[in-house]
Amino acid sequence: AYATIRRGLTTGCNQIFVNPRLKEDNEYLMDIISSPKAVSGFATTNAETDKLLVVKSESILSNEIKKYLANLEKTIAKANKPKTLAEKIKKGEQWYLLNVADCYGILFGYMVRNDMRFILNNSGMIARDNFYVISPSIDIHIMLALLNNYYVFAQLEMNGRKYGGGMLKLQKYDVESLTLTNLTAASDADQAGQKELGHMLAESGEREIIDDITMLLSRYESVGFQEIKTQFEYMRSNRLEFGK
């Protein structure tokens, strides 16, 4: 009801498109966030970025790009891999074109090791397929608060699939099926409070604000603040202990 979700950008072969061996000032290079590790806190403002090769169908290719793509095309055709790109080459398609979409919204790294984070990306910076991109239909800072709280984290801990090393993997449907606090029941003052807390979380990156968000939302939930926090921390500690 509040948002749509999709996967970040898939290139088909990261070695070709991410950090290609081209001049750094090349006009075809754009910033891309490749991993949750590249983001500190809860916003992409100061994220470490890689470079993504983006060639559009109407682009006038420079000699450097022509040479780079021609050499790769020969290599891909000869090896017949990556399969997806090799098939495009066989069909005579422009195999080097990427379907680059605006990633404005909130990013979620679906392979969770320690702490969960929904990350504000209000600049619309391109994100790789290590992320889900959540596009809210409501105020983005309210949405950030609705996602970064123990009610949501507990659901994800419960539904995710556990792997070695304490890893938790969340499928797209795990995020799509989240039950969020009903905004229609919240007072105008509390909605304004959620928005302010979302702003504070994005700007400061302090995880303590998650307590404040959960405390506010607990007014509209049947499970109290301390109970949901304890439940989440118990599940999280069990997962990390299990992964040792």
Image: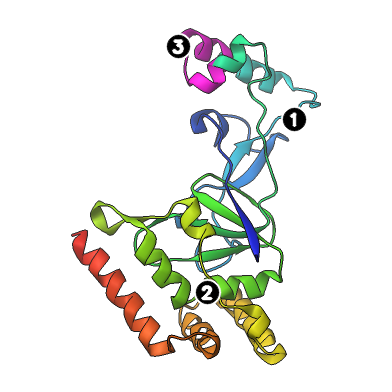
Q: Which residue is at 68% across, 16% downward?
A: 93
| Magenta-drawn segment | 72-86
Question: 200 or 226, which is in the foreground?
Answer: 226
In the rendered structure, the answer to whether residue 80 lies left or right of residue 182 reads left
Question: 221 or 112, which is in the foreground?
Answer: 221
Q: Which circle marks residue 56 in the picture?
A: 1
Label 2 sits on residue: 205
- What's the distance in space between the residues labelled 3 and 2, CA to CA? 46 Å
Identity, as a three-letter code, of the amino acid under mark 1: Lys
Mark 2 or mark 1: name the one nearer the start of the chain: 1
- What's the distance in space between the residues labelled 2 and 1, CA to CA? 36 Å
Q: Residue 35: x percent and y percent?
A: 48, 51
Q: Which residue is at 38% across, 89% downward?
A: 226
Mark 3 or mark 1: name the one nearer the start of the chain: 1
Q: Residue 86: x percent and y percent?
A: 54, 15
Identity, as a three-letter code, of the amino acid under mark 3: Ala
Q: Which circle marks residue 79 in the picture?
A: 3
Quarter of the image with the N terminus is bottom right
The answer to if 240 sits in the magenta stretch is: no
Q: Which residue is at 25% across, 65% downward?
A: 240
The quadrant in which residue 168 appears is bottom left
The answer to whether the residue labelled 2 contacts the one labelled 1, judged by CB atoms less than 8 Å apart, is: no
Question: 192 or 174, which is in the foreground?
Answer: 174
